Image (cartoon, rainbow, N blue to C red):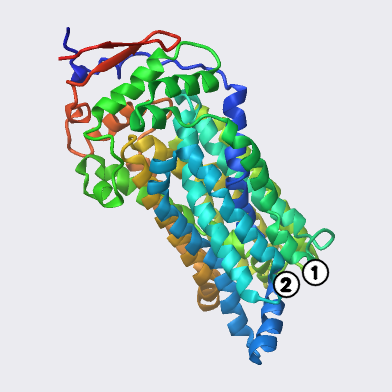
Amino acid sequence: MFRINISDGFLAQRVFSPCQNLTKSLLAVAFLASVGSSLLYGFNLAVVNSPALYIKDFYNETLQEHYGWIPNERHLTVLYSLTVSIFAIGGMIGALLVGKLVTKYGRKGTLVRSTVLVFVGGGLMGLSRSCREPSMVIIGRFIVGVHSGISLSVVPMYLGEIAPKNLRGFLGLIPSIHICLGVFIAQVLGLQELMGKEEHWPLLMSLIVFPTLIQLMLLPWFPESPRYLLIEKGNVHATIAALKWFRAKGNIQLEVEEMQEEQRSLSSIQTLSVWGLLMDVCVRWQVITIVVANIGMQLSGIDAIWFYTNDIFKNAGIPEPRIQYTTVGTGAIEVISGMLGCFTIERVGRRPLMIGGYIFMSVCCAGITVSVLFQEQLSFMRYISVGCVVGIIAGFCIGPAGVPFLITAELFKQSHRPAAYTMGGCLNWLSNFTIGFVFPFLELATGPYCYLIFCAICLGVAAYTFFIIPETRNKTFMEISQMFACKNNILEEELTSNGNLKMSHMNGYGTLGHQDVK
């Protein structure tokens, strides 16, 4: 019988050394979790861009057929804006469900079960033209939005929990690469030479069922999150099996001990509600951080670029036949930038990517305003405008695209994490809806000056990141909590308050032994 003083940082100060190499299992599960979720999110962001005129014509024709009503251009703009933004309303509802779903079904279990939404939504959109029913497009977009709202929070949570700390940044940005890849695929398939024809747009919007089918067939074979299995379910043997699967080889004892330290630090292993999260003074600055990161991510103007790329290029003076190819070129830049961020985040860190990305975006937003104002006097300004659009996309994909989801997993312990993702996701999607619906009218009212609003927001988020957010690279979840202890005016001892719990010791192969701690 012996006493361990948890407050002296016994385990927090130990050298935590999970397998340093990226295993095939980790890479495979990161790919499968992202390809049926994050890829679809990116695809659905951009897929409505190229067939915009065909969708408006379809609404015009069917409204006349069904109701004898001939809508004017403003009515069609409102209906199209609703089609674009209803995806975000579904996403917000999906984000509200995350906390309960991941607690009941687990991280992987939630991803697998939510795939049914894609098949229903994709089917409705694919059959809408044949059924001559415009509401099927809007309802289908709403349903796949619910799926994206769930998966956009669950995928980074799952990957953040299965990754060793030295690979958490790399694996955490794999979903953002798939988001960029989804945008690029939608842009390529939307070309006139491929599926950008009037008769093909419903099929284009329903292609999301194929990557989801791949995820549904293969992801169930992979283990659940070890942290979920141990901290929330108390299943040590399943935790050991999952860690062996993901780590392949090496001593997993220290990794399990780090999880147990986190478990002991929790006042309760029950998942907090969003209200409980907001009332917890121990995580006040973490909550403020995810609010700023998620709202800033969407209000930076990137969704306006993704939703209305063709219109922006048209207003910039790009000839109509060249617009679709210019748009595809921006998609390629997105993928390259996303990969650059993914492969540099563990060397550079989270803060530099966020700060640099937002500052670069702010400069490009100001550049769009200037170039549009002077493009009539200086013809080359239209190319400056295109360059600034590309710059916004590149700056966003390098850092701001994925880091907010990654740090949401890193800033919170197990009991707080689902509520944090629920709140962050809701704010993210609410901001997404606001931009998707308001931007066309904002652009009509303010012209190119609307990008100055995005410029100010980007600078504000960059400043907040510089002064408030600490670097979380290569830190355990407990170490990150202790970094925020001073800002939250709490003692580090309060973070590790449950010192009288039993502690489980394991050898390198996971054999469990118990020793009482008094």
Image quarter where the N terminus lies is: top left
Amino acid bearing label 2: Arg
Q: Can residue 356 be seen in this view?
A: no
Left or right: where 226 falls relative to 501: right
| 514, above or below 334, in the image | above
Q: Return the residue at label 1.
A: 199
User: Which sits earlier in the primary sequence, circle 2 or circle 1?
Assistant: 2
Q: Position of residue 181 (x, y in %)?
A: 66, 46
Q: How many dots with numbers?
A: 2
Left or right relative to 235: residue 397: right
Task: Give how far across and how far down residue 264 sits, in percent.
Answer: 25, 25
Disc 2 to disc 1: CB gap under 8 Å = yes
Q: Where is residue 194 in the image (x, y as percent from the top left)?
A: 82, 58
Give the structural element (helix, strand or loop) at label 2: helix
Q: Which residue has dot 2 on it?
A: 129
Number of other residues with Cα within 10 Å of mark 2, as a class: few under 14, some 14 to 19, many 20 or more: many
Q: Where is residue 487 in the image (x, y as percent from the top left)?
A: 23, 38
Find the distance from the CA under tag 2 to the CA under tag 1.
9 Å
